[in-house]
Image (cartoon, rainbow, N blue to C red):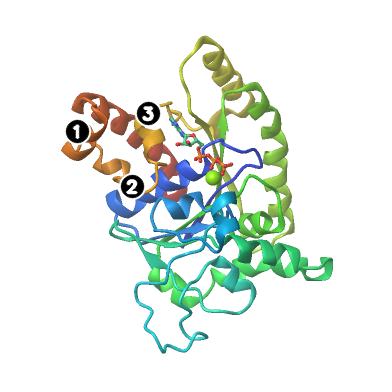
Amino acid sequence: MKIITSATHKGGEAKTTLAQVIASYTAQLKNKRTLLIDLDKQGSLSRRYLRMESEETRAEIDGTAIPPVHPDYREGNDPSDFPPRTSFHGIYHGQMVVPYPTSIPNLDIVPSWSSRLDAVLKNSPDYLLERVYNRPLEFFKLPELRSAYDVVIIDTPPDKNPLVIGALRASTHVFIPVQLAQMSLEGLEAMKIFVGQQNDVVCSDHEIKLAGIVPTIYDKSASQKKRLEFLKDQHGDLIIDPPMYKRVTITRLSETPAEPSSFLEWPSSVMAKKYGHKKSQQENDKHELLETCEEIYKRVFK
Ligand SMILES: Nc1ncnc2c1ncn2[C@@H]1O[C@H](COP(=O)(O)OP(=O)(O)OP(=O)(O)O)[C@@H](O)[C@H]1O
Ligand SMILES: [Mg+2]
């Protein structure tokens, strides 16, 4: 089972979008049974697939959300066997984590639950942190999970917190999205080192591969072109080529709820009518994104 993580400590670099498009690609085009995991308490990935609910009035204001009741949950189920709502926090408490189906075939998601993920961080004193770091690696070794999925894709928060460390340590492949902006590039080297450090501390039978740096939201301006060349000079083959171009169709994927939530459905009359796009533009955007996904896919599966 491949475990792909989209990570960088900088906000807004397209971590979530990257996780979303790779998931569509593996699930729909490559027929891989794919599990998405939302480790970000902002829950933006979860909102792209599920109707998230609010925990309390305050939660609505600060945007935090809880997963809906699982569609297979039945009143009277033993909550320790099948809790009504689950998120990845359950793995730290020995609870059942039941992935939610999405509208996309072959694609399930373990959503975010803001307060619960927060509690994992707040209630883990230093001597228990090793557990937060190592639990995901143990979880992904479960035979039930390995027989149910071919690939897991983890979306992480813009942070280097213990949940992110745990995700990195469990990963087989890490992709770092980066915008071609000065501030984004400044943090890249540190993130690369951070991934390498996690690989140094995991057990010797598990390798965390930094599989690619993905230039994102690329607008082909002269300054961005220059930075892309610089990146290629610095990091060589690590740079995913072609980059993810800045496209309004891609921005639309993050709308709530996304319609459709897969870029593979782009040249559809519904989308074209809704946003007034010409089919040819959408086909062009889809073609570009397919090439980027193919490059990422090759690095994981070949
Ligand atoms: N290639 C693209 N073209 C246009 N817009 C994009 C592209 N990629 C991402 N975006 C938009 O940029 C914004 C940030 O993207 P996204 O949420 O994926 O970033 P993130 O790194 O996950 O952010 P955060 O750090 O808050 O989790 C979103 O509104 C998204 O729709
Ligand atoms: Mg995100």
Callout 1: SS: helix
Tags 1 and 3 touching, CB below 8 Å: no
Amino acid type, mark 3: Val
Of labels 3 and 2, earlier in sequence is 3
Q: Decide if residue 156 is in sight here.
A: no
Tag in front: 1 or 2 = 1
| Nearest to the observer: residue 29 or residue 13 | 13
Give the label, 1 or 3, closer to the camera: 1
Left or right position of 64 against 285: right
Quadrant position of residue 118: bottom right
**Label 2 amino acid?**
Ser
Marker disc for residue 273: 1
The residue under the point 57% across, 79% down is 95
The residue that label 3 is drawn on is 248
Marks 2 and 1: in contact by CB < 8 Å?
Answer: no
Residue 77 visible, this angle: yes
Q: Please tell me how crowded label 1 is: few (under 14), some (14-19), or many (20+) other residues with Cα within 10 Å.
A: few
Q: Position of residue 49 (x, y in %)?
A: 38, 55
Ligand 2 found in image quarter: top right
Which residue does the image show at 59% across and 72% down from the upper left?
A: 91
Distance between mark 3 and mark 2 Cα atoms? 14 Å
* Residue 269: % across, % down: 16, 37
Residue at image position (68%, 47%) is: 159
Residue displayed at 36% across by 49% down: 257
Question: Is ligand 1 closer than 8 angstroms to the Cβ of mark 3?
Answer: yes
Among the two numbered marks 1 and 3 on one chain, the one whose residue lies closer to the N terminus: 3
Per the rendering, the mark at residue 126 is none
Q: Give the residue number, with chain letter if any, for mark 2.
A: 261
The vertical placement of 184 against 65, above or below, is above
Three-letter amino acid code at the position of disc 1: Lys
